Amino acid sequence: MKFRKSSTPAVFKPLRGSEIDGKRVRLREKKLSDVHNDYAWQCDAELSRFDAVQVLELPFALYLLDYSAELKKPRRTRFALGIDNLEGKHIGNCTCYEIDEKKNEAQFGIMIGDAEYRDKGYGRDAVNTMVDYVFQTTGLNRIYLKTLDWNLRAQKCFTGCGFTPCGETRRNGYNFVLMEMYKEQWEKGRSGNKGDEAH
Ligand SMILES: CC(C)(COP(=O)(O)OP(=O)(O)OC[C@H]1O[C@@H](n2cnc3c(N)ncnc32)[C@H](O)[C@@H]1OP(=O)(O)O)[C@@H](O)C(=O)NCCC(=O)NCCS
């Protein structure tokens, strides 16, 4: 899908059922049927370690209540999408959050939850697809992210998409690398077709 470049405000507009096509993935609005995968991924010890968070211990029924409330009333500061492969299988999620309409920036997070789909280029394609969408359709000028200093796969994926390291931070005893991409960098990178070759 092509999106028109415009002088839009920083905010995201609801997709209203349309999808964002990458080369290997399709990004689409979150839906209630994602709840089973999302719950399983949040209860997964390996994924929690990659995210430096505690394994979720909430009973499924309570998780479902929060989940459906969030879907009904999405926050303006958060734009979450499901990542499907081209056959429509839900393999992960990516999110812009802490969307700051004054600074025109947002934090980015991604998870290929289904381990079978890691290390096969789906993450890189999802990041490229989301970044293109953000810079083509919103007024955001900067996307930044944090990743654990030992998560070299994530860092390789992000640098391959055009993110550059911009500092370090420490939280709860964990060291994180900060990375960022400005719209200007993205424009230059995309004109040189940077980092989106197929594996
Ligand atoms: C991080 C993540 C999104 C990356 O997506 P992915 O589909 O697995 O990654 P890709 O295949 O697109 O790219 C990974 C790159 O890292 C490289 N890589 C893999 N393991 C590596 C390692 N241990 N050290 C260095 N590089 C590594 C791959 O070769 C590939 O580089 P290349 O494309 O130049 O060959 C995904 O692995 C994931 O969700 N992991 C679990 C959760 C997580 O780490 N989230 C990130 C939190 S910030």
Image (cartoon, rainbow, N blue to C red):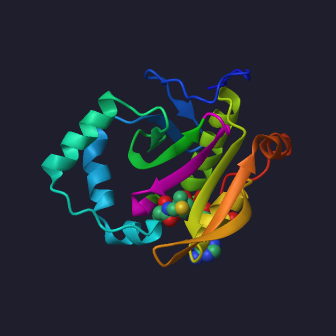
| Quadrant (top left/top right/bottom left/bottom right) for the N terminus | top right
Q: Where does the image place residue 187, in percent across and percent down from the top left?
A: 81, 39
Instruction: Tell me, yes or no, if residue 144 can be seen here.
Output: yes
| Residue 105: in magenta span | yes
| Quadrant (top left/top right/bottom left/bottom right) for the C terminus | bottom right
Q: Where does the image place residue 117, in percent across and percent down from the top left?
A: 46, 58
Which residue is at 30% across, 28% downward? 72
Up-down relation of residue 13 to residue 49 (above or below): above
| Residue 99: in magenta span | no
Relative depth, front residue between 167 and 16: 167
Instruction: Tell me, yes or no, if residue 118 can be seen here.
Output: no
Which residue is at 32% across, 59% downward? 42
Rendering quarter of residue 156: bottom right
In the image as oriented, which residue stretches furthest toward the front? 102
Using residue 128 as the reference point, say whether residue 109 is left or right of it: left
Up-down relation of residue 64 to residue 135 (above or below): below
Which residue is at 46% across, 69% downward? 50
Q: Where does the image place residue 185, in percent across and percent down from the top left?
A: 81, 46
Using residue 19 as the reference point, say whether residue 55 is left or right of it: left
Q: Which residues are magenta?
A: 101-116
Q: Where does the image place residue 164, in percent across and percent down from the top left?
A: 75, 60
Q: Report the image quarter containing ligand 1.
A: bottom right
Using residue 3 as the reference point, say whether residue 93 is left or right of it: left
Relative depth, front residue between 11 and 95: 11
Using residue 173 as the reference point, say whether residue 100 is left or right of it: right
Rendering quarter of residue 184: top right
